Image (cartoon, grey):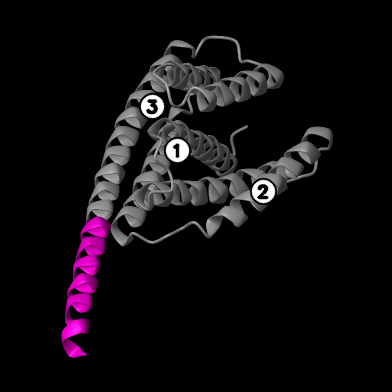
Amino acid sequence: MQDKQFPQSKVATAEQDNLAQVMGNSQAALGADVSSVLKNTYMLLGLTIAFSALVAYLSMDAPRPGIIVTLVGFYGLFFLTAKLSNSAWGLVSTFALTGFMGYTLGPIIGMFAGAGAMPIVANALGLTAFTFFGLSAYALITRKDFSFLAGFLTIGFFVLLGAMLIGFFTSMPGLQLMISAGFVIFSSAAILFQTSAIIHGGERNYILATISLYVSIYNLFLSLLQLLTAFAGDE
């Protein structure tokens, strides 16, 4: 009886070893994939931020685009980039999107420069960089899963959208500052969520990861700029 069971136990052990080897190879492949996505994302993000900053500098004296042009340009290029994210054209679209967003920033920064308020811009930029690097480092070091923020981001999006619509049709005191504060929280949560998604293999497309982080940084910078301007007493 025991002699008949012994070969079966050897087979079972061999199957377990093979399964463990397959799982180990899968985890190694996932780890390599995650490292590649992280590397490509931060490399592309750095290039797009530099390109966006250059466009913003060159467009400081340009006329400020209206809200319709800004929304159509942003959402059009954003969805185009998402559609092309699996091809080389996605890179071209990514730079078109971030360049356009840089163009929308240029006249705003030019307005601050004309008013002699560039220290506010510098403070907002420094605080944005500190927040982004701090949140990214926290997510990378702790390896905590922030996927639970998905529901918060969904709710936050609709709340902020509703608040902006109210602000567009009314002039409630303090509403714009509340919206800016809301965007600071929303953008910070989005940075944690996206970075966590890359770390845990939930996001394997570095183009999509890049534009997601870029939009969060863009909104964070604008929101901090508005808050710092209000605190400084400048209009």
Please indicate whether residue 25 sits to the left or right of residue 80 in the image.
left
Disc 2 is placed on an element classified as: helix
Q: Report the residue marked by disc 2.
A: 178
Q: From the image, state whether disc 1 or disc 3 is nearer to you.
A: 1
Q: Amino acid at mark 3?
A: Ile
Q: Nearer the viewer, residue 173 or 56?
A: 56
**Numbered marks: total:** 3
Please indicate whether residue 13 sits to the left or right of residue 166 in the image.
left
Q: Report the residue marked by disc 3.
A: 49
Instruction: Identify the magenta region.
Output: 1-24
Residue 74 in percent (x, y) is at 59, 23
Quarter of the figure with the C terminus: top right
Please report whichever mark, 2 or 3, sits nearer to the chain's N-terminal start: 3
Please report whichever mark, 2 or 1, sits nearer to the chain's N-terminal start: 2
Q: Which mark is residue 91?
A: none
Q: Could you give the CA–CA distance between mark 2 and mark 1, rounded to whole angstroms?
A: 22 Å
